[in-house]
Image (tube, rainbow, N blue to C red):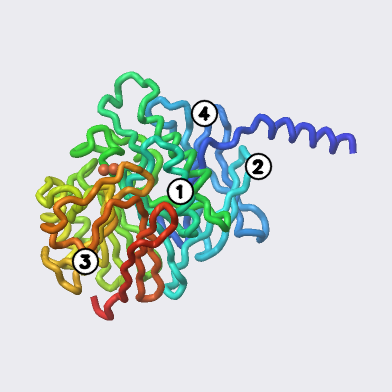
Amino acid sequence: MKRFIQLLIILSIVSLFAEEPLAVFLTWEDNPSTSMVVTWITSPNEKTNKLSYQPAGKGDWDEVGSVEQPFPLDFPYTIHKARLTNLKPETEYRFKTDNENNEWRFRTLPNDPTSELKFIIGGDLYNGHNSDFIEAARTSAAQSPQFAVIGGDIAYAHERKLFKERKKTKRERWIKWIKLWTKEMVTPEGYMIPIVPVIGNHDTIGHYNQTPRQSPIYYALFPTPNSQGYDVLDIGQHVSLITLDSGHTHAISGRQSLWLEAVLKQRRSIPHTLAVYHVPAYPAARKLSSRRGTLIRKYWTPIFDRHNLTAAFEHHEHTYKRTHPLRHHTIDPNGVIYLGNGGWGVKNIRTPKNTDKKWYLAKAMPKQHFILVTIKDRSRLFQAIDMQGTIFDHYQAEAPAVK
Ligand SMILES: [Fe+2]
Ligand SMILES: [Fe+2]
């Protein structure tokens, strides 16, 4: 009994010195129904290299090792990543890192088209104002999304002089943002909300025509898209989510366009194919002739048209817009819907301009929002939701029998 009490005292002292991770978040680099990447950030002196997990309430805890890397740009942190594989679809899991007592929970995605899939897409998220982010995060987490796609301008941590001396600068926003995400992006049922990232101009030093070296924190935090910069996430046999780099660290033309053509060609039988990227092909506030949008219409939208993409989610402008279905740059009932336009967590919302001349717009308004996507079998629903949780626009359709 005396030894047992001594052991209890020792364990309590150890747990007093164990620090909670600075942040914990989820991403994928493989099948989202059977895998998960857990990332956690600690101070460098925290010895932690294992993660324990179990299907909720069932059996023993399994253990998996982690890989570590220093946080870029001399931040005094370490990034740990553990890759969980061979998980069961649509199943709740619990996990804990070996330096904390806290348990976290997530749910793997369904791979069966008859199970409802519900996720959010929004861009232009955290520009340093905590209360604005918290409002956006709480409104969107309340929808119980199974994951969130962030369409670029994640933490507005760009700087032109990134490699000069490190002062307290905008790059600190990555740390503040990921801490807030850990705390706030949890569903009412208690599940963490995995991140599917997309890069935006404010996530790099020089906005455009950069390389991954100019976005070291973005590429260190997220295992995908890895240095390729663009990726595809297949969910079951019925949804493909294509994340693209609109010219920030990879060119719109060339290798990325060739990749996009091949990926969409292979997925012609997938009923729901969605592309997400930052700069819009079809702007609401800027001119249609603006440089990047023109490049996207030159290199990407013809590929979307050839392979019958379902919808393209665009950001960057801080407005809301939804286009008519478009094909070959004209309105066509079987065309692609372009929607979104950014303004999830940021409050500097812009007013759409010259909308009478923008023949492609079905709706355009100055509105902070995110989009809730609900997919079941062949039906899809896109709902635009404001920060009061009100649905102010929606688009519903069935996937055609033959694409
Ligand atoms: Fe932005
Ligand atoms: Fe932007």
Residue 166 on image: x %, y %: 36, 21
Ligand 2 is within 8 Å of the C-beta of the residue at disc 3: no
Classed neighbour count for the residue bearing mark 2: other residues with Cα under 10 Å, few (<14), some (14–19), many (≥20)? few
Where is 161 relative to 142, above or below?
A: above
Q: Amino acid at mark 2?
A: Asn
Q: Amino acid at mark 1?
A: Ala
Q: Which residue is mark 1?
A: 137
SS at mark 2 in the image: loop
Which of label 4 and label 1 is nearer to you?
1
SS at mark 4 in the image: loop
Instruction: Report if the CB atoms under discs 2 and 1 are less than 8 Å apart.
Output: no
Give the left or right position of residue 14, taking residue 231 as reference: right
Label 1 and label 3: CA atoms lie apart by 29 Å
Q: Earlier in the sequence, mark 4 or mark 1?
A: 4
SS at mark 3 in the image: loop
Which of label 2 and label 1 is nearer to you?
1
Instruction: Report if the CB atoms under discs 4 and 3 are less than 8 Å apart.
Output: no
Q: Which residue is mark 2?
A: 101
Tell me which image quadrant ligand 2 sits in. top left
Residue 46 on image: x %, y %: 57, 31
Q: Which residue is mark 4?
A: 44
What residue lies at 58% left-to-right and 49% top-to-bottom?
A: 104
Q: Which residue is mark 3?
A: 336
What residue lies at 39% left-to-right and 75% top-to-bottom?
A: 377
